[in-house]
Amino acid sequence: LVRKLRSINNSQTEIKIKSATSNDSFGPTTQELNELALLTHNDKPLRDITVILAKRLNDNSRNWRHVLKSLTVIQYCLVTGSTGFVNWMKSNQYLISTLKEFQLKDHDEIAHQIRQKSRTITMLLKDPALLEEKRTKFHSFRSSMSRP
């Protein structure tokens, strides 16, 4: 209820990205990831997504799900989203690089997942050929799925 009241003034995109990166124990869903990746192709939704991702990545360790889920969204959108999203991430790599040393008291497994995802994202951002290869493979796989 509190979350719904807070989201009254938010755009649909802000509601989607906040839902995908919430503190709930599940998600983001494949549907949420696909919708967010599609939304990155439009300027206003892209801006809404990136503003919230930047905030979520800076959350403290108490809200570690925000961080982990944001990394999941970023990794997915790097491969499936717009080049505008990729360019934003390249310009804001520092948001990810600080997480390569992420520590979480009493949750070593989760801290490891966050560190691993941040390393994977950093590797993609620093190797344009690898990122392009993953994007091409994904798009050709997706287009092959739509053919009978």
Image: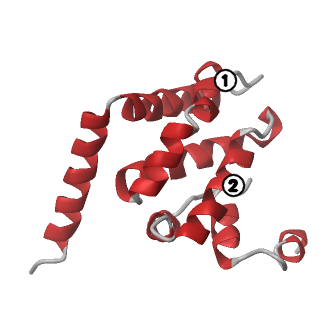
Callout 2, which amino acid? Val
Q: Is 80 on the left or on the right of 19, as rendered?
A: left
- From the viewer's perspective, is 106 left or right of 30? right
Determine the CA span between mark 2 and mark 1. Answer: 21 Å
Question: Which numbered disc covers residue 51?
Answer: 2
Point out the image quarter for the C terminus. bottom left
Looking at the picture, does residue 44 appear above or below residue 108? below
- Vertically, is 143 above or below 22? below
* Of residues 65 and 71, the one drawn nearer to the viewer in this rendering: 71
Whether residue 122 sits left or right of residue 127 in the image: it is right
Residue 113 placement, left or right of 79 = right
Q: Which residue lies furthest to the top in this view?
A: 101
Residue at the image point whose x is 83% and y is 76% from the top = 4
Of residues 85 and 32, the one nearer the viewer is 85
> Residue sitting at 53 percent across and 52 percent down?
73
Query: Residue at the location (50% across, 34% down)?
Result: 117
Give the labeled residue for mark 1: 102
- The quarter of the image holding the N terminus is bottom right
